[in-house]
Image (cartoon, rainbow, N blue to C red):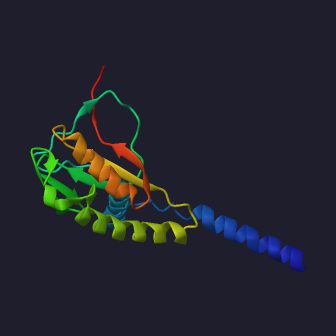
Amino acid sequence: MTPEELFQAKKEYKKAKRKDKPDDEAKLSITSLMDIVSIIVVYLLKSYASDPMMITPISEQKIPMSVMDTKIKEGVAIYVSSRELMFNEEVVAILKDGELEPSSVQGHVIQDLYTALEEERDKSKEIFEARNEEWVGRIILIGDEALKFSTIVDIMYTAGRLEFSEYSFCVITSSG
């Protein structure tokens, strides 16, 4: 028998053996199903958490209404209610009826906010530098509808001193 004939004979023998063998049923065990569900849950959580800006108002804060439809870009969030100024979940200044206490402001600079923003700016610049991207200082002001204009000016002036040059104001969109 030549090697070619031997190869053909072996090939036909294996083919016949496979035809006689019953098909195995594909079974999906509970472990496999749990793995699939776990993967889907993790994917959904990651997708939900990857939203660049998720704004949660602080207590007693009434965000103003607007017909604005521009999406907020990622930035540093500053929360201001009629009673407090918050940054990174810490109160940095006290307000009375939407106006800053005079002792916390010196020449339009809110010193505690300045210090906190300075640290945030430095961290942010390092991150952008590591990604080889240009840093853009962007502030998102989540303010109360009862804020005084002078308070907004002081916050913007303080942020501007630290190279934050773009400002977004959070509003609740109303139809019409």
Residue in the foreground of this view, choosing between 111 and 19:
111
Position above or below: 168 against 110: above
Residue 49 visible to the viewer:
no
- Residue 161 figure quarter: bottom left
Q: Is residue 120 left or right of residue 131?
A: left
- In the rendering, at what x and y percent does residue 139 appear? 36, 52
Using the rendered view, name the quadrant where residue 118 is placed: bottom left
Q: Give the x, y percent position of residue 30.
A: 30, 63
Q: Residue at x 48, y 62 (%)?
A: 24
Identified at 40% across, 66% down, the residue is 121
Q: Is residue 166 left or right of residue 89?
A: right
Q: For the N terminus, which image quadrant?
A: bottom right
User: For this rendering, which residue is in front, 48 or 88?
Assistant: 88
Q: Position of residue 21 (x, y in %)?
A: 55, 65
Residue drawn at 63 percent across, 68 percent down: 17
Compare residues 4 and 88 and report the one nearer the observer. 88
Query: Which residue is outermost to the right?
Result: 2
What residue occupies the far front of the structure in this picture?
107
Q: State which quarter of the image contains the C terminus.
A: top left
Judged left or right of residue 150, residue 7 is: right
Q: Locate residue 85, reporting x and y percent.
A: 19, 55
**Residue 107 can be seen, yes or no:** yes
